[in-house]
Amino acid sequence: MDLTLWAPAKVNLFLEVLRKRADGYHEVQTLLQHVDLCDEIRFAEGAGIVVETGGLACPGGEENLAHRAAALFFKATDTHPGVRIEITKRIPLGAGLGGGSSDAAATLWGLNRLFGTGLTSQALQELGAHLGSDVPLFFEGPTAWASGRGEQIRPLPAFPHSWLLIVFPGFPVSTAWAYTNLELTGEDKSIRVRTEAEKGNYERVLASSWNRLEDVVFRRYPVVKQLKVSLEAWGARPALMTGSGSAVFGRMHAREEAERWAARLREEGYTVFVVQTLSHPPLAPGGIGEMGPERSSC
């Protein structure tokens, strides 16, 4: 049996960093949204664990998070390893779009289905949390609030359908570097934003869009700040860096507007994606995970 899944990217519509914890992680409060920019992952039964990649630059083999996810799955389920995983990368690495975490979640979900092991979504999320703070998010959504180190997920009312323009400047930003160099102030902007998000009052949320990591990234990589300024000048509301960067996104009024500015940015040498927000959990029946961006209703 072969299986193909699509692993979507995410953007952070809000990101607050509160404090550094005793375990070395940072306490965060963040609003996340899935979009229809996806890696394609094909699974087939094989011998051992083989991970091959194509598309955008991405490590294969044991260096790939999908390989770690597969190894963890087989160990947790006491199943004999036997899978070949082929990943076509479309989500840039080190962009703050969650591509590696999404691939890991899709791998856990896909192997659970391929081998009929019957793990619940909660059990898969708990496994995913061992791989990375963002991994549990991709079993929920399409809109969710994450807290703790990012692994505590609360689904929210779906964000209104929107067209986003995502700009990748061509280089990654290290998440570890961004958090290490962040100057914490003790301020917490998340309380009111979370309350409004839980009510589905997203226009009020967008008026308070914020990413605590922007300042530290902007100081070292001024081009990221300039991209945000450009998106704001072109009418994006909000325009924001996602995660720890380096990608910046803007919510545009219409697809045509997004495509117009995307063409200009591509002429300047940037990697640009025009995407839409998802309205269904990606790994739910009929979601983008199974159907793909062309056949799903998003």
Image (cartoon, grey):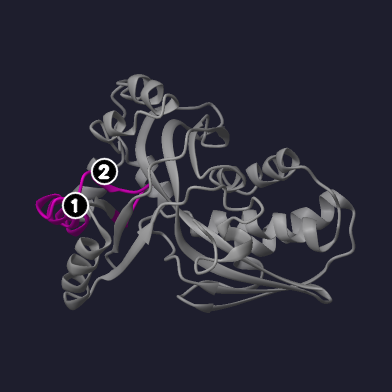
Q: Is residue 240 magenta?
A: yes
Quick check: 159 left or right of 225? right
Tag 2: residue type? Glu
Whether the residues at callouts 2 and 1 have beta carbons within 8 Å, the answer is yes
Quick check: 214 left or right of 105? left
Whether residue 164 is visible here, answered yes or no, is yes
Element under disc 2: helix
Front residue of 81/277: it is 277
Residue 147 horizontal/vertical position (percent)? 50, 30
Q: Quadrant of residue 205?
A: top left
Residue 281 horizontal/vertical position (percent)? 57, 47
Instruction: Count residues near mark 2 (Cα–Cα under 10 Å), then give few for <14, some for 14-19, many for 20+.
Output: many
From what the image shows, is residue 269 above or below residue 291?
Answer: below
Residue 240 horizontal/vertical position (percent)? 26, 46
Quick check: 215 left or right of 143? left
Quick check: 98 left or right of 220? right
Per the rendered image, the range of residues in magenta is: 222-248
Front residue of 285/230: it is 285
Q: The N terminus appears in which quarter of the rendering?
A: bottom right
Residue 9 horizontal/vertical position (percent)? 47, 56
User: Marks 2 and 1, Cα distance to the nearest angstrom?
Assistant: 10 Å
Q: Quadrant of residue 54?
A: bottom right
Q: Is residue 236 magenta?
A: yes
Q: Which residue is mark 1?
A: 228
Which residue appears at 60% of the width and 59% of the height?
A: 289
Which tag is nearer the camera, tag 2 or tag 1? 1
Of the two numbered discs 2 and 1 on the same chain, state the one appearing first in sequence. Answer: 2
Q: Which residue is mark 2?
A: 214
